[in-house]
Amino acid sequence: FCKSVSVHFMLQFKPSYCRNLLCEMECHEHAWPFLLPVNTKQFPQYKKVIKSPMDLSTIKRKLHENSYKCKEEFASDVRLMFSNCEVFNEDDSPVGRAGHHMRGYFEQRWPQLT
Ligand SMILES: Cc1ncccc1N[C@@H](C)c1ccc2c(c1)OCCCO2
């Protein structure tokens, strides 16, 4: 999925850019539903409905563990987090609205290379 090796060294994965953007998201006013994994004791249905849970603390851990081989993998986890939110939460709900706010914030700052 990542760029071929030859091109890759030029578009070197900039973890610093991702780390900064992640930090800005974590301190965003509407980040509160996404800071930690959804507690499945609090939301027993969640595990059944959402096959791949994702949250900002998990993305942060993966970034620090060098789990992301390219920036697109980082972006796809962020987008997975927002898609899970849309599946489980009504648009017109506090968490649903927070998800739309945060997704707008991310997409505005994510470099459009294509
Ligand atoms: C992103 C997401 N999707 C689906 C369900 C929950 C969440 N986030 C969690 C952190 C959460 C959100 C709202 C909450 C909550 C916990 O605490 C119980 C009281 C009501 O408020």
Image: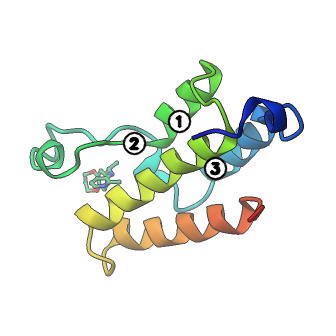
What residue is rendered at 63% in x and 46% in y? 72
Q: Residue 13: horizontal and vertical position, in percent?
A: 77, 35
Q: Disc 1 marks which residue? A: 59
Q: Are marks 1 and 2 in contact (CB under 8 Å)?
A: yes
Kind of residue sitting beneath label 1: Ile
Query: Under 8 Å from ligand 1: the CB of mark 3?
Result: no
Q: Of helix, strand and loop, which one carries label 2?
A: loop
What residue is rendered at 50% in x and 34% in y? 57
In the image, farthest residue toward the top: 65
Query: N-terminal of the two: label 1 or label 2?
Result: 2
Q: Residue 30: horizontal and vertical position, in percent?
A: 52, 62
Kind of residue sitting beneath label 3: Cys
Q: Disc 3 marks which residue? A: 27
Query: N-terminal of the two: label 3 or label 1?
Result: 3
Q: Of helix, strand and loop, which one carries label 1?
A: helix
Kind of residue sitting beneath label 2: Met
Q: Residue 107: horizontal and vertical position, in percent?
A: 64, 66
Q: Are marks 3 and 1 in contact (CB under 8 Å)?
A: no
What residue is rendered at 26% in x and 74% in y? 90
Do we see residue 13 in this rendering?
yes
Q: Quadrant of the C terminus?
A: bottom right
